[in-house]
Image (tube, rainbow, N blue to C red):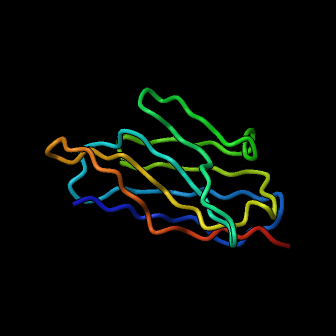
Amino acid sequence: QVQLVESGGGLVQPGGSLRLSCAASGSVFSINAGSWYRQAPGKERELVAEIIPGGRTNYADSVKGRCTISKDNAKNTVYLQMNSLKPEDTAVYYCNTQVYDLGRRLYDVWGQGTQVTVSS
């Protein structure tokens, strides 16, 4: 059994920064790939950033230059560093990871979501 626990969301003023964390726990061997999505009220869920096997990263045009996705293999954690936040970044952010368990089975797991609100 593998679970994801997200943290780091909150209320921040425009121009501020937040770092979201997504920690895999349970029978985890390693994280193969990780992504962050977000969903604003009345809008569809959209991909914000992803880190794929080998370490290559991809970003939505709306966050390029402001966000950095990274992965700590020792901690089985995926991060999203967000800088220069704008009100339009307000959304629930979801982590999605591909995780190998101790039996080397690959799972696609979603976090519970964390609220990010950018407002003065």
Q: Position of residue 26 (x, y in %)?
A: 24, 59
Q: Quadrant of residue 92?
A: bottom right
Vertical position of residue 71 compared to residue 108: above or below: above
Report the number of numbered marks.
0
What residue sits 52% from the left and 61% below the top? Answer: 94
Q: Quadrant of residue 45?
A: bottom right
Please state, as top left, top right, bottom left or bottom right, where the C terminus lies in the image. Answer: bottom right
Vertical position of residue 66 compared to residue 114: above or below: above
Q: Position of residue 5 (x, y in %)?
A: 41, 64
Q: Position of residue 33 (x, y in %)?
A: 41, 40
Q: Horizontally, is 114 left or right of 15 in the view?
A: left
Q: Horizontally, is 113 left or right of 29 in the view?
A: right
Q: Horizontally, is 7 left or right of 58 in the view?
A: left
Q: Position of residue 37 (x, y in %)?
A: 57, 55
What residue sits 57% from the left and 64% below the top? Answer: 8
Please state, as top left, top right, bottom left or bottom right, where the N terminus lies in the image. Answer: bottom left
Q: Quadrant of residue 17?
A: bottom right
What residue sits 81% from the left and 64% below the top? Answer: 87
What residue sits 66% from the left and 58% below the top? Answer: 18
Vertical position of residue 57 compared to residue 100: above or below: above
